[in-house]
Image (cartoon, helix red, strand yellow):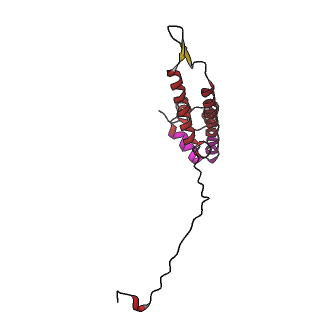
């Protein structure tokens, strides 16, 4: 792949694909035959671009969150009619939908752990005590002398 020259239009296309289409950075760059490393290099050397990229990733995470709800709510293929005319669960569809939801949840937790990661709450309302035993030593008590 040839090196691409940085331009505002190219960077905007990449950011739009991430924020508007929900593409990963890799897929967004591939659409313009841009090596992923180039875009990351540009972000490392351009604070404004880095901030725009961070914002595009936040928007992408919100899109993934919305997709989870849509997948979970989609019930049109949850049942099928068998050869005898009986309706039965479409376990393949249900399993695939669960996988799609789980994959997006995992990605969200990695992309934005503070917002979408598992929260661990520590509750320490119990009493805690400390017992101190004071032992007095005198010079004559030391057996190592």
Q: Residue at x 48, y 34 (%)?
A: 2
Q: Position of residue 6 (x, y in %)?
A: 58, 38
Q: Is residue 93 magenta?
A: no
For residue 54, what is the image quadrant? top right
Above-or-below relation of 79 to 67: above
Quarter the C terminus occupies: bottom left
For residue 130, what is the image quadrant? bottom right
- Is 19 displayed left or right of 37 in the figure? right
- Is 134 displayed left or right of 126 in the figure? left
Q: Position of residue 129 (x, y in %)?
A: 56, 68
For the view shown, which residue lies furthest in the left direction? 144
Q: Position of residue 46 (x, y in %)?
A: 61, 46
Q: Residue at x 50, y 77 (%)?
A: 133
Q: Is residue 43 magenta?
A: yes
In front of the other: 21 or 101? 101
For the view shown, which residue lies furthest in the top direction? 84
* Main secondary structure found in the magenta portion: helix
Q: Residue at x 57, y 49 (%)?
A: 120
In front of the other: 73 or 6? 73
Q: Position of residue 134 (x, y in %)?
A: 50, 80
Q: Which residues are magenta?
A: 37-54
The number of callouts visible is 0
In front of the other: 2 or 121? 121
Q: Residue at x 53, y 72 (%)?
A: 131
């Amino acid at each position: 792949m040839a090196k691409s020259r940085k331009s505002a239009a190219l960077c905007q296309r990449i950011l739009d694909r991430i924020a508007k289409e929900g593409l990963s950075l890799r897929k967004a760059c591939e659409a313009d035959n841009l090596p992923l490393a180039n875009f990351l290099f540009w972000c490392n050397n351009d604070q404004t671009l880095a901030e725009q990229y961070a914002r595009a990733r936040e928007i992408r995470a919100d899109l993934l969150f919305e997709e989870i709800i849509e997948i979970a709510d989609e019930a049109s293929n949850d049942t099928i009619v068998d050869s005898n005319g009986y309706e039965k669960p479409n376990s393949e569809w249900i399993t695939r939908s669960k996988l799609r939801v789980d994959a997006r949840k995992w990605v969200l937790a990695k992309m934005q752990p503070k917002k979408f990661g598992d929260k661990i709450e520590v509750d320490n309302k119990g009493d805690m005590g400390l017992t101190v035993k004071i032992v007095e030593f005198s010079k004559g008590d030391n057996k190592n002398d």
